[in-house]
Structures are given as structure tokens and as C-alpha cells.
Image (tube, rainbow, N blue to C red):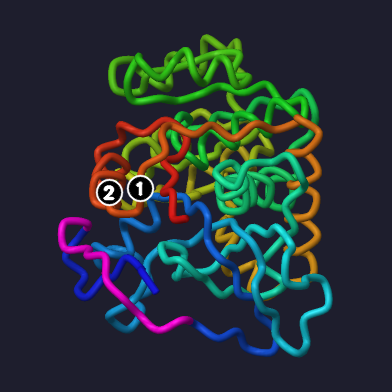
Amino acid sequence: MKAVLCSSFTGPGDLRVGEIDEPRPAADEILIDVHAASVSFMDQLLVSGLYQMRPPTPFVPGTEAAGIVVAVGDKVTTFRPGDRAACNAWTGGYAEQMIAKESKSVRVPDGIAFETAATVLHNYGTAWYALVERARAQRGETVLVTGAAGGVGLAAVDLGRHLGLRVVAGIGSDDKAILVRDYGASDVINYRSDDLRIQIKSITCGDGIDVGFDNVGGPIFEQMARVMKWGGRLMPIGFTSGEIPSLPMNLPLLKNYSIIGVFSGAWAEKFPIEAACMNDMLMQLLAAGSIRPHIDRVLPMEEVTIAMRAVANRTVQGRIVLKIT
């Protein structure tokens, strides 16, 4: 079958479309004919050798896809061939077929396009796990989301609006302001041109933020650490800046706030039942129109290098989706 292959950790430019054997699902896995797969910042890091894990090469990138179930393992009880499904895995999405754990897959409601379904589990799953499970965010609290126009960031803005939070969107260029406001941000800060600390103090009348949802890392995280409210929760989600920050620990001490790690993929591995319930809930929200993933563009699988370079250059708003079949 046709698939995108990563043979070395040298970045998107060395990805090639080739032929591989069809995968076979294990007892607790399903196999889908992939119709669409989303392109994430994590995928770009993985093929560039910059992620915390390195699969044996060659491997097929792609953490998330959607399509039709064609086979199920002996222990699978919630899927059968012919079902519409979305899947989440560390690798394997950029291929005509993909296998995934039953616990990391979810049925896609009728009427939901596969392109849309392929953008939910990673983006909104990360946002839900961070805001609801880790931060325990409460209606009316103020959350600052950095990288707010990207896949995970925009999902956090959208979900924050749904949860009744006051969302402040941090962006790196002014052309992203319209989108984040359309998705529910009440305030927007361009942290490349504005002083983040001054803007937050102005927006919150000096109180600071209850929840920090940081996708960027580096100096941005360090600035967020200085605008937290008493009892707040500051969450490192990712480090798209390429710089992992360090922090003077007197800052959380003085305001009694918490720094809370968020690694939704590891949580899903350790708590598969809870993760499966979350995935079902997210698809219900999608079907009801309560969340609305944003697709920047849809490209053919053969243009995966273009897609990943756009993600790396931060020119993508929401998600790019690859059309597989």
C-alpha cells in the first residue's frame, strides 16, 4: 500500500511516498482505510529528530487519521468493519491504512467529514485534558492561551469559550487575530510586538491570569510565570519556540500557584478507559456543533513536505489535513 516514509530524522524534506506491506491489527487494535490525516507540530518534530521519542526507521509519520474500519482484533468490542472511525497513535497516519488501539479510536458520527474528524482527538483532547482534568478550570476564570492560532491553541480557545472561560489569545502575528476572536477570544495579545506582562495587567486590572496554557515555551513561559494570579495554574503544553524554559521557583511560591505538566499522550496510555470516554465526549460535542475544528487547507498526501514546512514556519491556522483516499 502507499504511505509516506521517514527513513532518517533529517526533517520534512527527506520524506518520500513509497510502498509498504498492509498492517495487521493486534487483538486490541482496529485497522482503518484512511481517508484523511492531520498534520501536527509533533509530527514535524518527530521526523526532524526533535521529539522525545524516536521510532525505528523507516516509519510512517502521522498521529491522527480518520476513515472506515476494515478489520478488528479478536478482543475489540466497540468497532466492526464498516464503522466510521477516527484514530490516534504515535505514528502510522500518513498511509492508505492505519492501525490503532481500540482505546485510542472513536466512532465518527454520520454527517461529520473525515477531514474534520481527523483534527479532533489530538487538538481537542490535549485542550480538554489540560483545561478540565489538569487545571480544573472554572467558569468565569481567565485563561491565557499562547500559540492560540495553531492546532492545539485554537482548540483551547474554542473549548475555553465552550466551558465559559474568559479567553485571552496570545499570537505571534496580527494576521491571526481575526481567527482567534472568531473562535471566542475576548482579548488578543501579539507577544512579538506587545509587552505581554503589561497587556495582561491591563486586561485583568492587575489581577493576573487564573490559567496559563502555554504552547510556546522559552521567554513567553517565563513572562507568563510573572502574571499568574494567586492560586493559579500554569501549564507547559509544548515548546514550539524550540527553547525549554527554566523558572525561578520563588515565583510560584510567592503567589501560591501551581505548575502543572500536561502530556495527554502519556495519560491516554496509562488511563485508556478515561481517554476513550473523553474521545466519545469530544465527538458528541463536534456532532452538536459545540466545537468546530478549523482546517487551514487540505492537501494530497504527496504534498506532505509542503504541509510540514508550513507547520514549522507557523503559517498554519488550525490544522492542515492530508487527503489520503
Measured as percent of width and height from the top left, residue 278 is found at 76, 55
Measured as percent of width and height from the top left, residue 74 is found at 75, 90
> Residue at 37% of width from left, 66% of height from top?
61
Q: Secondary structure at mark 1?
A: strand
Report which residue position mark 1 lands on. 300
> Is residue 155 part of the magenta span, yes or no?
no
> Residue at 52% of width from left, 9% of height from top?
202
Measured as percent of width and height from the top left, residue 284 is found at 81, 44
Looking at the rendering, the stretch of residues picked out in magenta corresponds to 12-22
> Is residue 13 part of the magenta span, yes or no?
yes
Report which residue position mark 2 lands on. 303
Query: Disc 2 residue type?
Result: Glu
| Towards the viewer: 214 or 298 | 298
Pointer 2 local density, CA inside 10 Å: few below 14, some 14–19, many at least 20 = some
Horizontally, residue 101 falls left or right of residue 313, namely right
Q: CA distance from mark 2 to mark 1?
A: 6 Å
> Residue at 60% of width from left, 58% of height from top?
67
Horizontally, residue 23 falls left or right of residue 128, namely left
| Towards the viewer: 61 or 225 | 61
Horizontally, residue 181 falls left or right of residue 43, namely right
The answer to whether marks 2 and 1 mark residues whose Cβ atoms lie closer than 8 Å is yes
Query: Disc 1 residue type?
Result: Pro
Pointer 1 local density, CA inside 10 Å: few below 14, some 14–19, many at least 20 = few
In which quadrant is the N terminus drawn?
A: bottom left
> Residue at 81% of width from left, 34% of height from top?
288
Horizontally, residue 160 falls left or right of residue 174, namely right
| Numbered badge on residue 110 | none
| Towards the viewer: 139 or 33 | 33
